[in-house]
């Protein structure tokens, strides 16, 4: 059953939490334990810290499970200058920037942060649900050969689409950083989400050989 979006309000700020997107990176707990305490109910109490401090910590959430809105002045996290993909060792893709993702159910989300599955085992695809830990996904996260095309971008938005039974298609300006700190740039490419590619983080067609069923 899909867990309901949780909302926590204080003067000047509203914090929302989407449980299905959380992979317990714990950036919020480390950043402001007086506000974010999983052992407490409610576990988020935004009145315990300054709004700007809360906004700063919520921005560290790599999955987009936590979001904020400053209600006394409009502030959008989408106004980021660089779209980036961080390849996590033995883990997901951390994606940040001006993002637009098309989901299999027909929805389109515009968000500044998300963690996307690349092991093939998540039950919340295209998002990560920590299944990489359960299956002991083993990939160091290096980028290898740059397979991004440089075609020029008409928009600064990074558009993402999970191809049915196939890769994550990216279209728009993006920087991909591997665990070896190598930075690769381009505007178009296909990232593996079945976990079987020999060219990770890029797709090499292995999803067809293994009969990958994404959704």
Image (cartoon, rainbow, N blue to C red):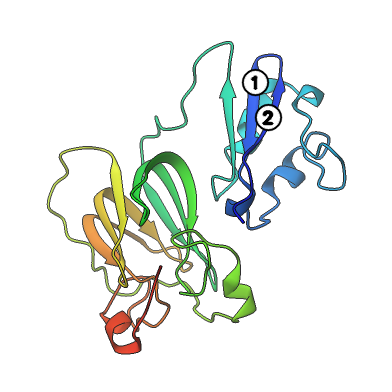
Which quadrant does the C terminus fall into? bottom left
Q: Quadrant of residue 203?
A: bottom left
Where residue 104 appears, x then y in whole percent? 35, 57
Q: Nearer the viewer, mark 2 or mark 1?
A: 1
Q: Would you say 45 lies left or right of 156 here?
A: right
Image vertical order of residue 50 relative to residue 99, above or below: above
Residue 196: x percent and y percent?
A: 39, 83
Residue 29 locus on image (x, y percent): 76, 45
- Residue at numbered disc 1: 13
Up the image or down, 71 lies above or below 172; here it is: above
Q: Disc 2 to disc 1, how far (Cα)?
A: 9 Å
Q: How many marks?
A: 2
Task: Check disc 2 and report the residue beneath it.
Answer: 54
Answer whether labels 2 and 1 touch (C-beta < 8 Å).
yes
Label 2: few (<14), some (14–19) or many (≥20) C-alpha neighbours in 10 Å:
many
* Label 2 SS: helix
Describe residue 149's horizontal placement relative to residue 215 as left or right: left
| Residue found farthest to the left | 151
Residue at the image point whose x is 32% and y is 80% from the top: 207
Q: Is residue 105 above or below residue 179?
A: above
Crowding at label 1, few (<14), some or many (≥20) Cα neighbours within 10 Å? Answer: many
Identity of the residue drawn at 41% across and 32% down? 78
Which residue is at the front of the view, 22 or 124? 124
Q: Farthest residue in the right direction? A: 40
């Amino acid at each position: 059953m899909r867990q309901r979006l949780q909302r926590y309000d204080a003067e000047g700020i509203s914090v929302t939490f989407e449980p299905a997107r959380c992979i317990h990176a714990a950036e919020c707990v480390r950043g402001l334990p007086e506000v974010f305490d999983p052992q407490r109910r409610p576990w988020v109490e935004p009145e315990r810290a300054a709004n700007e401090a809360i906004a700063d910590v919520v921005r560290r959430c790599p999955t987009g499970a936590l979001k904020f809105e400053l209600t006394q002045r409009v502030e959008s996290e989408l106004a980021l200058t660089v779209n980036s993909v961080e390849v996590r060792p033995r883990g997901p893709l951390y994606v940040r920037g001006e993002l637009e993702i098309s989901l299999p159910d027909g929805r389109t989300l515009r968000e500044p942060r998300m963690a996307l599955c690349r092991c093939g085992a998540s039950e919340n695809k295209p998002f990560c649900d920590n299944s990489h830990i359960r299956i002991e996904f083993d990939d160091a996260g290096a980028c290898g050969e740059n397979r991004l095309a440089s075609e020029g971008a008409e928009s600064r938005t990074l558009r993402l689409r999970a191809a049915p039974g196939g890769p994550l298609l990216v279209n728009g300006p993006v920087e991909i950083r591997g665990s070896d700190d190598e930075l690769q740039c381009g505007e178009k490419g296909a990232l593996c989400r079945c976990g079987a590619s020999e060219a990770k983080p890029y797709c090499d067609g292995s999803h067809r050989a293994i009969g990958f069923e994404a959704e």
